[in-house]
């Protein structure tokens, strides 16, 4: 990896996701529509979006969106069991881990080193392999992240952690929250599972 050409120092070619073509679709329906479709639904609880640049002392757009999504969904970063995050370049995991509240500022590298974000860690990040492994079809990327989280929650992923997660967090250009009422946090719990998307 380190012998590849520099894209933007210190990032090298294999540290940046390849741009590609692709397509994806999500089906959104009302409760009545879901009954007609005989679907296996995930209910959206909230959606948040932030954009623009902020002053260095201000809270960034990702942090602001994450806080709003957690608040709307009634969860905290510690309630999230699996994350799909936008990783167009290798450092994204470290940066976004801090921005969405999994680690304190500056704590992203320690979270990664401790194995907390590995497939069988406390909160796996990008069990799909992320954009660095599958490429970055610009328009389809966010949908692919949402599909991965829903598949993880439903226990139908080959790349799943040892137990079916109860909550997940896709982090795309837009943010939102969703809940799949069929997946309790544990077999003895009747709490709803949640997908929070900052």
Image (cartoon, helix red, strand yellow):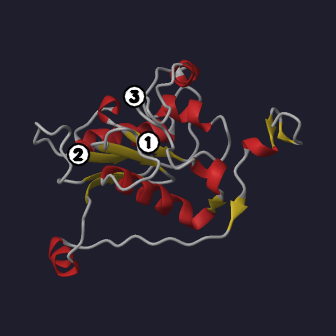
- Residue that label 3 marks: 122
Q: Earlier in the sequence, mark 2 or mark 3?
A: 3
Look at the picture and state if 85 lies above or below 119: below
Quarter assignment of residue 93: top right
Q: Which of marks 1 and 2 is nearer the N terminus?
A: 1
Q: How crowded is mark 1: few (under 14 residues within 10 Å), some or many (20 or more)?
A: many
Front in this rendered view, residue 39 or 164 = 164
Q: In this view, does 187 lie to the left or right of 66?
A: left
Give the residue at mark 2.
193
Circle 1 is placed at which residue position?
83
* Residue 11 visible (yes or no): yes
Q: What is the C-alpha distance between the residues marked 2 and 3?
A: 16 Å
Residue 71 picture location, percent across and down: 27, 39
Which mark is nearer the camera, 2 or 3? 3
Question: Could you tell me if the residues under marks 1 and 2 are in contact, i.e. CB atoms within 8 Å?
Answer: no
Check the picture and name the quadrant holding the C terminus: top left
The mark closer to the camera, 3 or 1, is: 3
Task: Determine the CA span between mark 1 and mark 2.
Answer: 14 Å
Query: Mark 2: few, some, or many residues within 10 Å (few <14, many ≥20)?
Result: many
| Residue closest to the eye, 195 or 115 | 115
Q: Is residue 55 visible?
A: no
At x 62%, y 63%, the residue is: 138
Residue 116: x %, y % from top left: 46, 25
Residue displayed at 31% across by 71% down: 28
Task: Determine the image quadrant of residue 168.
Answer: top left
39 relative position to 27: left or right: left
Label 2–label 3 contact, CB within 8 A: no
Marks 3/1: CA–CA distance? 11 Å
Residue 137: give x, y in percent of width and height. Answer: 63, 64
């Amino acid at each position: 990896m380190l012998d590849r050409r520099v894209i933007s120092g210190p990032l090298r070619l294999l540290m940046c996701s390849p741009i590609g073509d692709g397509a994806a679709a999500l089906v959104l329906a009302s409760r009545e529509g879901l009954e007609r479709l005989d679907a296996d639904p995930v209910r959206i609880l909230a959606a948040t979006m932030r954009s623009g640049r902020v002053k260095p002392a201000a809270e960034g757009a990702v942090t602001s969106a994450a806080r709003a999504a957690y608040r709307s969904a009634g969860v905290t970063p510690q309630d999230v069991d699996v994350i799909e995050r936008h990783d167009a370049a290798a450092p994204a995991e470290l940066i976004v881990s801090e921005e969405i509240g999994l680690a304190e500022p500056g704590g992203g590298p320690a979270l990664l080193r401790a194995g907390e974000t590995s497939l069988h860690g406390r909160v796996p990040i990008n069990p799909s392999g992320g954009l660095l492994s599958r490429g970055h079809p610009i328009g389809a990327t966010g949908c692919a992240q949402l599909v991965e989280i829903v598949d993880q929650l439903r226990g139908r992923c080959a790349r799943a952690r040892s137990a079916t997660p109860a909550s997940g967090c896709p982090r795309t250009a837009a943010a939102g929250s969703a809940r799949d009422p069929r997946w309790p946090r544990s077999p003895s719990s009747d709490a709803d599972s949640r997908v929070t998307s900052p």
